[in-house]
Image (tube, rainbow, N blue to C red):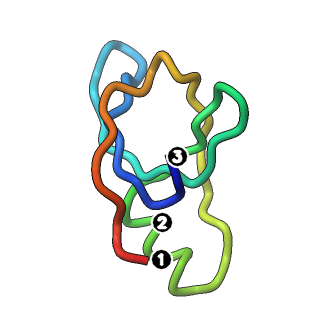
Amino acid sequence: MTAGHLVNVIADRGGIIKRTVVSVENDVYFVCKPEEFEVARKEGREPVCTGFKREYILKEGRPQAR
């Protein structure tokens, strides 16, 4: 899995949210909102992200344009 891929994540209370992968370290996926990923890319900075363990990642999607 590489930066820019869209994934579905199990959020608290069992909700499903769509997020963009920023990086993966060991068993933790660092993700952010697709909008944040795009703005950060345009501004030349790292996106503000949150880490989720692998078991909370449901589905891997296709990468966003970089």
Q: Quadrant of residue 51?
A: top right
Tell me the CA gap for discs 1 and 3.
14 Å
Q: Quadrant of residue 58?
A: top left
Q: Position of residue 1 (x, y in %)?
A: 50, 45
Q: Is residue 2 left or right of residue 60?
A: right
Q: Amino acid at mark 3?
A: Val
Point 67% across, 68% down: residue? 46
Q: Which residue is tagged 3?
A: 31
Tell me the CA gap for discs 1 and 2.
6 Å
Q: Is residue 5 left or right of residue 3?
A: left
Q: Are marks 1 and 2 in contact (CB under 8 Å)?
A: yes
Q: Earlier along the polypeptide chain: callout 2 or callout 3? A: 3
Q: Which residue is tagged 2?
A: 37
Q: Which residue is tagged 1?
A: 39
Q: Quadrant of residue 22?
A: bottom right
Q: Earlier along the polypeptide chain: callout 1 or callout 3? A: 3
